[in-house]
Image (cartoon, rainbow, N blue to C red):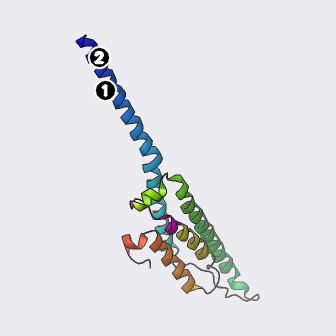
Amino acid sequence: MAESVRGMSVLWGALLAVGVFVVGQAILKFVVEPIEEQRKLIGEVAYALRFYANVSLIRMLSPKDVARKQEYYARKQEVDEMKKALLELSSRVLASLWAIPFYDTLALLGSVPKKYDVLEASDHLVEWSQTLYGMKGKERSRHREIVANRLGISKKIGEIG
């Protein structure tokens, strides 16, 4: 009788251990990993804020300025690639809201940025991408600053240059 009770205790202990392991892995896979991915994504945004700080395309060529057309088109291609990168970051930042379950609760706990801040940062990444053509330096700076503040980048590394 004592041996069967001991056997049942071992069985229940093993089942409990397996259950705890499975629940732990589920939390890791469905909550912790998406939060880590969002943090990596915010790091990519911080990189873009610094890397693309002074990129713009100022239309300074006249149709007769053949000598500088090649330079202009090379610069335009660079700006087009940056615009695409910013739009992709905006979309991925927005998508991160759906990848993390219980987002609002985790935001209240401070584990992730607030939903409103993520939405606003995503919008301003798009708006930043739309200021790349022409003399809109103040607008570009304002959008970059809002993105940095909303995603908590300014708190970690200071002002974006």
Q: Is residue 98 left or right of residue 110?
A: right
Q: Examine the image and state in which quarter residue 139 appears.
A: bottom right
* Point 68% across, 76% down: residue: 73
Mark 1 crowd level (few <14, some 14–19, many ≥20, 10 Å Cα): few
Label 2, label 1: how far apart the Cα atoms are: 10 Å
Residue lying farthest to the top in this orientation? 1
Q: Position of residue 115 (x, y in %)?
A: 50, 64
Q: Amino acid at mark 1?
A: Gly
Q: Which mark is residue 112?
A: none
65 over 26 or under it: above or below: below
- Decide which of tag 2 and tag 1 comes sooner along the chain: 2
> Can you identify the residue that label 1 sits on?
13
* Point 59% across, 80% down: residue: 56
Q: Is residue 127 left or right of residue 141?
A: right
* Point 38% across, 76% down: residue: 158
Q: What's the magenta bit mostly, secondary-structure-wise? A: loop
In depth, the one of 152 and 4 nearer the eye is 4
* Point 58% across, 71% down: residue: 123
In depth, the one of 69 and 41 nearer the eye is 41
> Can you identify the residue that label 2 sits on?
7
47 over 6 or under it: above or below: below
Q: Amino acid at mark 2?
A: Gly
Q: Position of residue 144 (x, y in %)?
A: 51, 76
Q: Secondary structure at mark 2?
A: helix
In depth, the one of 18 and 126 nearer the eye is 18
Q: Which residues are magenta?
A: 109-118
- Count of picture labels: 2
Residue lying farthest to the left in this orientation? 2
